[in-house]
Amino acid sequence: MLNTGMTIAVALRRVAETRLDQEALVCGEVRVTYGQLLERVGALARGLRGLGVRKGDKVAALLPPGPEFIYLLFAVAELGGVIVPLNPQLRQRALSDVLQDAEPVALITSRPVEDAVLHSVSSLRHVIFADAKSAPSLVRDMRCDGRPASAGSSRLKPGLRQDCAPETSLSLAGLMAAPEAPQSPDPVSPQDLLALLYTSGTTGTPKGTMHSHRSLIAPVVASIKLRELWVRRPSLKTLGQTARALARYRERLLRAAGRPQTFLSTVGWHTITGLEVVFQALLMGDRLVVMPRFHPRQAMELIEQERVTVVVAVPMAYQVMLGLQDFDRCDTSSLLICGTGAAPCPPHLAREIQRRFGCAVHIGFGATETAGGIAATSLADSTQRQSETVGRPMPGMEIKVVDHERRPLPPGQVGELACRSDSVMLGYYRAPELTAEVMDEDGWYYTGDLAVIDEAGYVHIVGRKKDVIIRGGQNIYPAEIEAYLTSHPQVREAAVVGVPSAVGGESVWAFVVPEGGAEMTAQEVLDYCRVALEPYKIPGRVQFVTDFPRSETGKPQKFRLREMALHETKGGELP
């Protein structure tokens, strides 16, 4: 059993040493056993140590999901270093900003990086390429003072050490083949910083969240306890839940119970959702099937070929998969759980996933600041609760709903959701004032999400605190209107925002993405709203769009939608 008193490296060794010959990782043609994983992680840790990477040093990873990322993640954990996972699609300006903020000593990349970016990061000592074949052709000239080399200067030679400029000719394969470093590793504790994760930036301002070994292993420990419901022999306490799950999923549950699961990861590993999939799969002794980049048809093929039991994807990815013309030809009978999170999942989509895939939907609700899951639905939950709530708190997670003065509210009342557990971040990197805004001295993290906890303990998310619309003195929660709009068969997605009104207060704007090929009018949308919504909740304006501006995890960026609405109200045209 794992626990929060372990480091991530110790946890991996404990799990791997009991299943050395079991397949751990599948990515394209690459298949890696747990024994091979341990060897490669150890080899890379020795190579990084040989470069002088020490406890507390930050290592940035500009990599897509794949074996190289996993070797690096666990190697950095073994050294006591700090991994900084970055979106491999970051543009050069954004990349430069994040690297300057994070201050890594090394950058591992699968793509070229402009000289200007490398020169702007004074802490950077090593640039290491994931692909050994690419490294020589991607070498950048640099002088010892960190500025571009002069026209007549020579290039850095492979293996040449220069303490004041990045070594740009190294490769991961070369590091893994390096001889044993003479230095002994520094002791690492669960409280040590392990990851610096940048938020998705739905507000346009990404922040670095600091996570320790303990905060990142805590969700895995919680998931192990949840899995006991259907993996182990039920106790008197869980007998009823197990019976309900078995009645619902029968053969699927019986085939999966007591065996290693096969996870399919479709989410980028620079996000907390993607990173937790890696930890959930490999630290629970399961098998991880990796997609470096999501493609709906390939995802369906992998589910069938690899007999995937747990797939994790953002709601938009499920929507695209369900839209494939040959969806019903794929064998999805191995699936037990379709997990989703990172963005709101409309109830109608959750029900469609249940029906078409034939399995349970686990809607996880969490944040980068909480290392993922705060609450989640489970196999034992009813169809309605799986689609209309985000479940109950994860084991070990305390939650409460509070008013604007942070006083606890009773069940059934809307307020800000707060949580406390070992998985809560250490704080925002180099931003104590921002940390103090969202965390109190007792360790409670205030999410900024508005929620209701019902009498049975299930959590219903009704919107973001900053997104509440005040119209005629009434509070309007956009999530309620969005859920209702997406129940219309011709509406694929909806986003509702408040825009300052000329007569005071706010007007309600609904941005609507129609289903492919559907033709709707604003009047049809308004008539549909009048059927079930109170008059003050009915949008004052309906705007049709082909898609929303989105964060990298697929969330609509409402601040940009407000900007679009304001631009139009001032006489401009929508961009």
Image: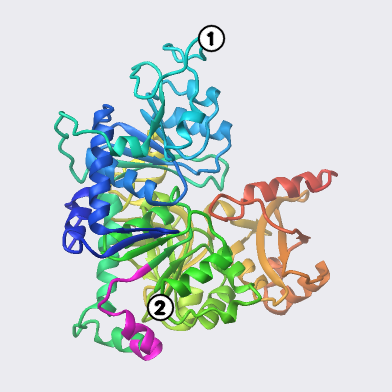
Please say if 574 is above or below 390. Answer: above
**Residue mark closest to the camera, 1 vs 2:** 1
Residue 379: percent from left, percent from top: 37, 79
Q: Residue type at mark 1: give it.
A: Ser
Q: Nearer the viewer, residue 409 or 452?
A: 452
Residue labelled with disc 2: 336
Q: Quadrant of residue 298?
A: bottom right
In the rendered view, does 257 fall on the left or right side of 148?
left
Residue 156: percent from left, percent from top: 43, 18
Q: Does residue 259 belong to the magenta stretch?
A: yes
Q: Which residues are magenta?
A: 246-262
Please say if 105 is above or below 133. Answer: above
Q: Quadrant of residue 496?
A: bottom right
Q: Nearer the viewer, residue 471 or 297?
A: 297
Residue at screen point 36% across, 53% down:
371
Residue projecting furthest to the right: 571
Residue projecting furthest to the bottom: 247
Q: Earlier in the sequence, mark 1 or mark 2?
A: 1
Residue labelled with disc 1: 150
Please say if 381 is above or below 93. Answer: below
Query: How far, Cα to Cα, is label 1 from label 2?
Result: 60 Å
Magenta stretch prevailing secondary structure: helix
Residue at screen point 81% across, 67% down:
522
